[in-house]
Image (cartoon, coloured by chain):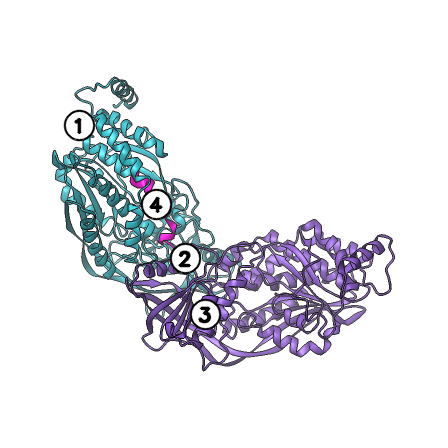
Chain colours: A cyan, B purple
Amino acid sequence: MRHPSLTLLAASLLLASGVACAADTTIPSAAVKTAEQLRDKAMHDDTGYRIVTSLTEIGPRLAGSPADQRGVDWAVAEFKALGFDKVYTEPVTYPKWVRRSEHGAIVSPFPQRLVLTALGYSPGTPKGGLTAQIVRFEGLDALKAANPAAIKGKIVFVDYRMHRYKDGHDYGVGSPIRVEGPVIAQAKGAAGYLLRTVGTDPHSRTPNTGVTGFRDQTKTIPAAAVSNPDADQLERALATGKPVTVRLDLDCGIEGQYTGANVIGEITGAKHPDQVVAIGGHLDSWDPGTGAIDDGAGVAIAMAAGKLIHDLPQRPDRTIRVIAFANEEMGLWGGRAYAEKHAGDVRKFQLGTESDFGAGQVWRMSASVKPEARGAIEQIAKVLSPIGVAYDAKRPGGGGSDLSQMHGKGMAALSLTQDGTNYFDWHHTAADTLDKIDPKDMAQNVAVYAAFSYMAAQADGDFGSAPGAFANDGAGD
Amino acid sequence: MRHPSLTLLAASLLLASGVACAADTTIPSAAVKTAEQLRDKAMHDDTGYRIVTSLTEIGPRLAGSPADQRGVDWAVAEFKALGFDKVYTEPVTYPKWVRRSEHGAIVSPFPQRLVLTALGYSPGTPKGGLTAQIVRFEGLDALKAANPAAIKGKIVFVDYRMHRYKDGHDYGVGSPIRVEGPVIAQAKGAAGYLLRTVGTDPHSRTPNTGVTGFRDQTKTIPAAAVSNPDADQLERALATGKPVTVRLDLDCGIEGQYTGANVIGEITGAKHPDQVVAIGGHLDSWDPGTGAIDDGAGVAIAMAAGKLIHDLPQRPDRTIRVIAFANEEMGLWGGRAYAEKHAGDVRKFQLGTESDFGAGQVWRMSASVKPEARGAIEQIAKVLSPIGVAYDAKRPGGGGSDLSQMHGKGMAALSLTQDGTNYFDWHHTAADTLDKIDPKDMAQNVAVYAAFSYMAAQADGDFGSAPGAFANDGAGD
């Protein structure tokens, strides 16, 4: 049993008196002071915004596409231009999914175009399209409970309307409808799968794409998301009481394997170069937009934080490792490859977290660390508090999307939760473009990442990374 | 010289005493009372919303398309179902413009997709697309002033950012950039024309289409609008100082002539069946959306107003004529055909106006009528005031889009200005769908149209319609 509150109290008292137990991890006061300076400098620095601007000029970086390689080349060049000490890549291999075209229509009771987007790993429809009656479900539970006889040969339509929250928690409902739903529908004999877009803009006609859980390519059906206004139209068609027939015409699918790369830049630690603070984002994006908020922002935040630490008069004690992950979007391929490769070194990962929830300001921090490092986390929280970050000692820290995989291996991790109020208006849509990013918000994110990374790098002691250390912390991200 | 203020004062005094000059037009008090009842009933009636819902099920009704004919059939059937006394069509012939596909990209300095929409009457590009350097102008005046040598062989890019206003007046700047700009650019030797979308949503990637002023098909160049985020991207590309090359790939153009129809429904007047109050909207729409706010709403508002008058215990004195115009979007074809056909009967048009600015609430009324009818207009204003309509006695009344043409022939007309704050976020885009309409706002519009139409139909006297009567009233809409 851990008693974090007592530990925290003890740590606070000890810190107040400038003394720490041998077992407790602490941040030296000089490092705290430097972190405060880094924070304050970052709040008025546009490096992060400049980087994400440059990255969005690549355009959409669909994993395995020509732009994916341009993104890798860009990241290598950018790390070098920023002065990182070491820049390298690690290969990541995955199935290459290609989108060529996508069309849809209501055939009856009234003919009308449907604006839709094919989902990742969806196969194409037969030539001439797939025309079938739709059968509607309120959500995933209703689909799970459905009799296959009601589904066989039809196009399943799951009609869940996602709602807007600061922490984006309704994605926890919407995402499985997109990921698991098509697999369930296929198993019950559906001919195709449609969902109301996993997005919170009720008015836009740029639906949110995203990956399905199709892994076995012998068990797939065409799957697509319709925009909210189009889902409304389907509801009205169903309300007539007549059979509603829809045509899907998707030209997409898997074309063999592709080997991309995680791109890594390091600010080499002066005292413990083999011990790393790991931060990052993912380099790939969905193809309708330009991948500004998902996840150009995350890559830029981490790169800029590294750059600010690089610009200090001397190198930090430990290495700051910035990772631009490959193919997060279609199933954490970069993160899983990374974790597999580095699991044996997990003790060398001082602390880590990834930014992958847009560019809204960080408003909450939580951590999964050993009890003896709670005091150091409190020290970090105290530095981040003036820029709007509240420390929630009761929640675990999951490390973000790709780095959740290293956390799963035992890496001590933070969660730095951004304001996601508008995130799902634009996430995975054509509207994921640079105008969605406020340079001031970017600067705040960079300040958070620079300050925490530096403090973790300078800590006296570690945060508890060890094989399987946080297996039961309940981190969900 | 007219002295409207004195006339108004005189009319008010006379009305207050219950006496009117023989020369003054007035609304009998029984008619005012019935209009108030109509108004109050309409505020809680969903007929308008039901009609526009049904119309959007047709989908986009691009003039000359198969859905245009479906729209005509729908309107005939709907008028009949609503119980209109007389339902008929009048032919309207125009060039048929067809959109097949549209793509665009920045070629250099960094390759990237551009989300764009071809403009009405734009020709297609040659096979393989048109690739040329762009040359940017802040607005139309800069383009007009430009030396043709700076334009020849290039793609002109007019980069005016439209702003949001309740009365939508910035469309007065944006619209000419779309209509006149391509003609000016062609005359100066441009190879193509791009504009920042004439739309007020800075974040959407559904650009606003619309018509150009191309009339002579031997003098056209490919013309398209890019979304605001794409225009931002072009600005960033230009900011590099390097030449910016763009590829346009448009498959569209004119395919002969088409004959569509204005569809007209009448509630026949009991006393003066040949004298008409003319209201309406336009039946055609642009093709990306479903034509809900532009102009399904207008058609539905006018139809519903007619229906409410139809449901009174007895027919009004004069005829209520509801006109669903053909092909407003590509140059008021329906409105011009109507005015040409009926100009000789202009004295029989008691008063008229068209709804074509979305479905926001009416907040302002103005009128172009003879001085002796100002008192009657004041009476109408008094009935509309409790539902939020302010009378502006200083502005002319233009009659709306298509009916502006009858006003030009001398029809007395109102302007009933709707709240257009969000109108240009959606106008002519894929996002022009039913969810943009608030049923309560629709009801308010129907209340306005029903009340004013009935009062005009019951007036003792006319509003001054006569050939050329309002030629110099300055009505702009």
Segment colored magenta: A431-447
Viewer-nearest of labels 2 and 1? Answer: 1
User: Residue A386 lies in what quarter of the image?
Assistant: top left
As measured in the structure, the alpha-carbon distance from the residue carrying label 3 to the one carrying label 1 is: 69 Å
As measured in the structure, the alpha-carbon distance from the residue carrying label 3 to the one carrying label 4 is: 42 Å
Instruction: Note whether A92 is above or below B315 in the view shown.
Output: above
Q: Quadrant of the N terminus of chain B?
A: bottom right
Cβ–Cβ under 8 Å for marks 4 and 1: no
In the image, taking residue A257 as reference, residue A109 lies left or right, namely: right
Chain ID at mark 2: A
Q: Amino acid at mark 3?
A: Ala
Cβ–Cβ under 8 Å for marks 2 and 3: no
Image disc number at residue A397? none
Between B215 and A136, the one lying in front of the other is B215
Q: Position of residue B157 (x, y in %)?
A: 40, 66
In the rendered image, which residue does mark 2 sit on?
A: A206
Viewer-nearest of labels 3 and 4? Answer: 3
* Magenta stretch holds residue B134: no
Q: Position of residue B331 (x, y in %)?
A: 55, 73
Tags 2 and 1 both on a single chain: yes
Q: Position of residue A400 (x, y in %)?
A: 28, 41
Cβ–Cβ under 8 Å for marks 2 and 4: no
In the rendered image, which residue does mark 3 sit on?
A: B145
In the rendered image, which residue does mark 4 sit on?
A: A359
Residue A191 in sight here: no
Chain ID at mark 1: A
Q: Amino acid at mark 4?
A: Ala
Between B280 and A116, the one lying in front of the other is B280
Chain ID at mark 4: A
Q: Secondary structure at mark 4?
A: loop
Q: Secondary structure at mark 3?
A: helix
